[in-house]
Amino acid sequence: MNWGTGIVLTIIAFVVLIMTMVVISVRMDGIELVTENYYEEEIKYQDRIDESNSALGLDREVISYDAQSKVLALDLPNGTTGTLQLFRPSDSSLDQEIVVNVTHSGITEVTLENLKTGYWKVQLNWSENGVDHYQEKKITI
């Protein structure tokens, strides 16, 4: 075999390898965006920053997670309304949204025993005394 044949075979092998990688990547399932309406969420990003800063000004940890009992504790005052989003980055079909209406004083507990084990993002949006707040916590179940 001479140099010309070796170079041609190397180029053909390289093209076959690249084409195989393209076919595999096109056929892959489970490639998802973080959210369905990504561009709308990006426009509202400054509002999210302002809500996060207002939550930091509360001087209390609103979301806490106990890994032993798999319970999420929310420290919200009576009359607070909001939404709790349980976001699974690796599989959007497992995402959940829970409406939060606090009708008592003290800690509100949300059990997470029915969730699949792994990495989760907990996102809480709530309104307290007419001010919107946002807090996020990353947990592993």
Image (cartoon, rainbow, N blue to C red):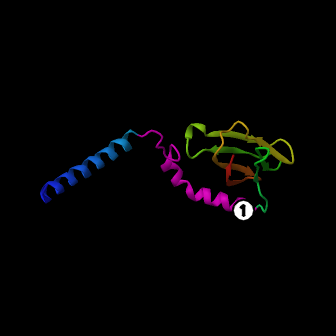
Q: Quadrant of the N terminus?
A: bottom left
In the foreground, 10 or 47: 10
Picture coordinates of residue 39, whole percent (x, y): 48, 50
Picture coordinates of residue 88, whole percent (x, y): 60, 44
Q: Which range is magenta?
A: 28-57
Q: Is residue 28 left or right of residue 36?
A: left
**Can residue 12 be seen from the camera position used here?**
yes
Residue placed at 31% from the left, 44% from the top? 20
Picture coordinates of residue 86, whole percent (x, y): 65, 44
Picture coordinates of residue 44, whole percent (x, y): 55, 54
Q: Quadrant of residue 98?
A: top right
Which amino acid, by three-letter code, is at mark 1? Leu
Q: Which residue lies under the disc numbered 1? A: 56
123 inside magenta stretch: no
**Can residue 78 be seen from the camera position used here?**
no
Residue placed at 34% from the left, 46% from the top? 21
Count of marks, rendered view: 1
75 relative to 50, above or below = above
In the foreground, 36 or 90: 90
Name the secondary structure under disc 1.
helix
Q: Is residue 90 left or right of residue 111?
A: left
In the foreground, 27 or 42: 27
